[in-house]
Amino acid sequence: MKNVSSRRYVLKGTLVLGAALIAGSGLSSARAADYRLLNVSYDPTRELYGDINRAFPAFWSKTHAGDSIVVTSSHGGSGAQARSVLEGAPADIVTLGLAYDIDILAQNGLLAANWQTRLPHNSTPYTSTIVFLVRKGNPKSIHDWPDLIRDGVQVVTPNPKTSGGARWNYLAAWGWALRQPGGSEQSATAYLKALFAHVPVLDTGARGATNSFVQRGLGDVLIAWEDEALLASRDLGPDKFDIVVPPLTILAEPPVATVDRNIQEHGTEAISRAYLEFLFSPEGQRIGAKHYFRPVDPTIQAETASVFPKTTTFDVASLGGWTRLQKAHFSDGGIFDQIYSH
Amino acid sequence: MKPLTVTVLRPTRRHTLPGFSLSLGLTLLWTGLIVVLPLTALLFRPWHNGAGTMIHALYDARMHAALRVSFTCALLAVLIDLPIGLLLAWTLVRYRPPGHRVVDAMIDLPFAIPTAVTGIALATLYGPNGWIGSISSQWGLKLAFSPAGIVIALTFIGLPFIVRSIEPVLRSFPKDVEEAAFLLGASGWQRFRLILLPTLAPALLSGVGLAFARGVGEYGSVIFIAGNQPFHSEVAPLLIVMRLQEFNYDGATSIALILLVIALLCLVAVSRLRRSVSSGLVREDGA
């Protein structure tokens, strides 16, 4: 299977080269074109990419006047979305919750294996982090990871096996525990075991968990992406929740990529790449910040510093990278299953 | 004088139904494409990389627990649905209370509502903050986010199957049989036990079979109210979704196949029971 895909890459490389030549020769004749782009994304980015899709045509027409562009987004669980692209959804662009889901597409020959190095910041235009959402006034005084496993504290977090977003929650806890004095894989596993003993409900998705915490009043603390927490605390109930940013947490990097095989087929290579570049542009970065995703551009970071509290973060690479983590923790019989085994 | 000609009219069609072979062909084709083909794929996929995945699935303790949760909850839900469904169908057919048409239309709602909506609505209602959940929790009764929640969701989903399978039989049940029994001095309970129940039994059983099978496979409404705790309130279809999330198609189809085989055995058992009940009925009639 490896051999077939590598041969496919060679073939694909030739195709890309050929397509680039044709595109290059076509540029001089600059004719107006009709583009339809599909961005297959994950759940909490619905509003973000709604705004991006509305703003992108203006960005593109600066260099390509007269083109007509329709960008649509599709949203769902990150893993399910990756599966749909794998099974043939005509995505030009994927913007998913974790690099592992795009790695799977690369393993199946849909895009180059080195996709994550093609754009700055590990192909991540916006980052986020994992924070705690607590009831107003923080009645259980939760400030850091050890507080989550105190007696009488109930924690709401989705099942990391069914929710890509929740894998970040889990790995934030894992990484924190590893970094404690005397921390080891054993001590980190013990911490996670204790943590999940405090989780009364394992929702299958991040929005489900937010619902359980916000609407049903379940639990004392919700482990959540910062953008979801800010959305819940600012827009759903400003007087109901507080956000606690733990002193040490994970840097969540939801990456983006073009689906090489599909954009060659659709003839949308240039515009799909431009769409991703737009995400890194000052305008794209501001739209991201508006939806509570942390910008990577230093200028926009400075502009929006008041929205995002400072914290120390570690990234997934420092924990061993997605492929290794996925296998060790979230595969059948992995560490997460062991936590629940009798 | 012209010679007398006799035209012999022969039946040209061998079947009374027009276009029999065409319709049969089409039916078989559709059934093949829609039912048999995916099921065949399900039969073959788990062995893709040898028997290892299947053996692993068969001996997984968590899988056993999930199967136990799924089948027990589906069974309990059907047992709850049975008297409620019978009562509901009886009331609608026999008493026709004011507004019975509205109730009649509402019975099918669980079919129509997206299962996720059902799950979220039930979790809200039975959750710790909900109307029912807040009262029940005062008595220390935890309904949502426990196996009880699964039973509640499956009861809701299964009810129309019971009502809809009894209703037509009840409607066409001749009243004079009951009247005769009454005149012969049978009490209300005797009329129900000896006249009505045996007549309804085959329909009841097929309703039970349908509701049970649906309950075992139900995912959408259950996951919102179950709590999804491994070994405790995790249903088998959730394990399938987990395997898919790991891009482990072989593992997913292994569980699906096990689920399918057990469900099939249950359905076969129900249909055998139904046949023996109906044949028993015929014998009693003296036919």
Image (tube, coloured by chain):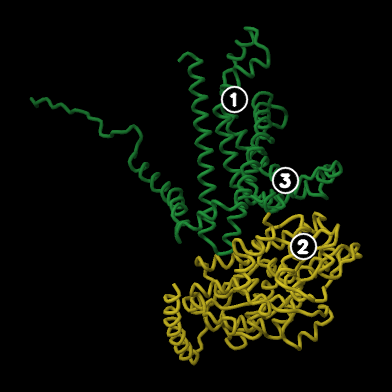
Chain colours: A yellow, B green
> What subunit carries mark 3?
B
Q: Secondary structure at mark 3?
A: helix
* Residue at mark 3: B149
For marks 3 and 1, the one nearer the N-term is 3
**B279 relative to A91, above or below:** above
Image mark for residue B49: none
User: How many discs mark residues in the rendered view?
Assistant: 3
**Measured Cα–Cα span from mark 3 to mark 1:** 32 Å
Residue sitting at x 50%, y 33%: B271
Q: Secondary structure at mark 2?
A: helix
Q: Residues within 10 Å of mark 3 (few under 14, many from 20)?
A: many
* Residue at mark 2: A195
Camera-near label (3 vs 1) is 3
Q: Position of residue A65 (x, y in %)?
A: 58, 86
Asked whether residue A291 is in view, the answer is no
Camera-near label (3 vs 2) is 2
Answer yes or no: are tags 3 and 2 on the same subunit: no
* Residue at mark 1: B170
Q: Residues within 10 Å of mark 2 (few under 14, many from 20)?
A: many
**A173 relative to A57, above or below:** above
Q: Position of residue A311 (x, y in %)?
A: 81, 79
Q: Secondary structure at mark 1?
A: helix
